[in-house]
Image (tube, rainbow, N blue to C red):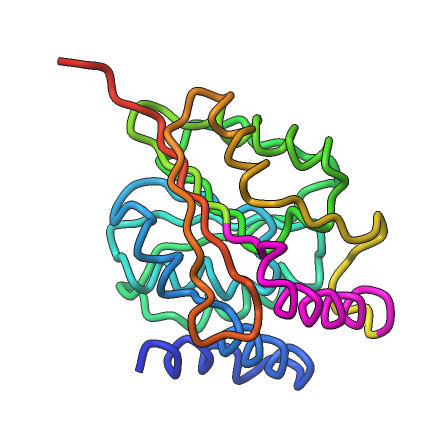
Amino acid sequence: MRGRRLLSLYRGSPSAVRLHTALRWASCPFPAVEAVVPPRGRILEVGCGHGLLSLFLAMSGPARRVHGVDVDQAKVDAARSAAGRLGSREAEVSFDTVARGWRPHDRVDAVVIADVLYLLEPAEQRRLLSACAGCLGPGGVLVVKEVATEPAWKFRWNQVQETLSTRVLGITAGGDGLHFVPPSTMAGWLGGEQLGVESRAVDRGYPWPHHLLVARRPRPAP
């Protein structure tokens, strides 16, 4: 039911946007991501694309104030149009375009990054994660959904799909190539930011090796 309502927000969008959001909903474990995001507070999604996850987070948690940012103006416009179809009390969500190389700096309760980092070179991935970690106060959460490099058959299938999306169809901006960093490496980076890290696969029922990292800023001892 939530998925149907979510996708209905794009009914006035171009057919390519409607198709992309429908495929994105079907192929990504959004509920698993949503379940680890705080139920209230300021939530930032980095690389929000058409806004599907930001809208889902806002609709699933009315006490959340969700803000999505992306480098693609056309996708942000589609996200804003979809948000405009929400009821006045249904959710609080907003979107903005940012420049390439942008870093977050405002204090938030959670940062969410889903299927974005692999489009950046590893050193840039680490810098962005460090900046996101720096936005978290005590108890803040950084949620990263990426793909693992195992099992090998799922990883190979994902590589084929992403190559098609970035280099053939141009659906995703991947000018710097595809850079799949193992989740264990990312977990090490996040641990170096003094965050407690939980790492787990969320690929059951999917032909893609979805993986979730949940990094929390500890609260001070009482």
**Where is the C terminus found, in terms of image quarters?**
top left
First to last magenta residue range: 145-168
Magenta stretch prevailing secondary structure: helix
Camera-side residue of 94 and 217: 217
Lateral position of residue 101 relative to residue 79, left or right: right
Which image quarter: residue 172?
bottom right
Residue furthest out toward the left: 222
Which image quarter: residue 13?
bottom right
Q: How many marks?
A: 0
Across and down, in percent, residue 12 comes to: 56, 83
In the image, residue 58 above or below residue 143:
below
Lateral position of residue 138 relative to residue 188, left or right: left
**Where is the N terminus found, in terms of image quarters?**
bottom left
Across and down, in percent, residue 73 comes to: 71, 57
Which image quarter: residue 4?
bottom left
Camera-side residue of 205 and 36: 205
Across and down, in percent, residue 205 comes to: 44, 76
Q: Residue at x 86, y 66 (%)?
A: 167
In the image, residue 137 above or below residue 201:
above
| Magenta stretch contains residue 59 | no
Q: Residue at x 56, y 73 (%)?
A: 24
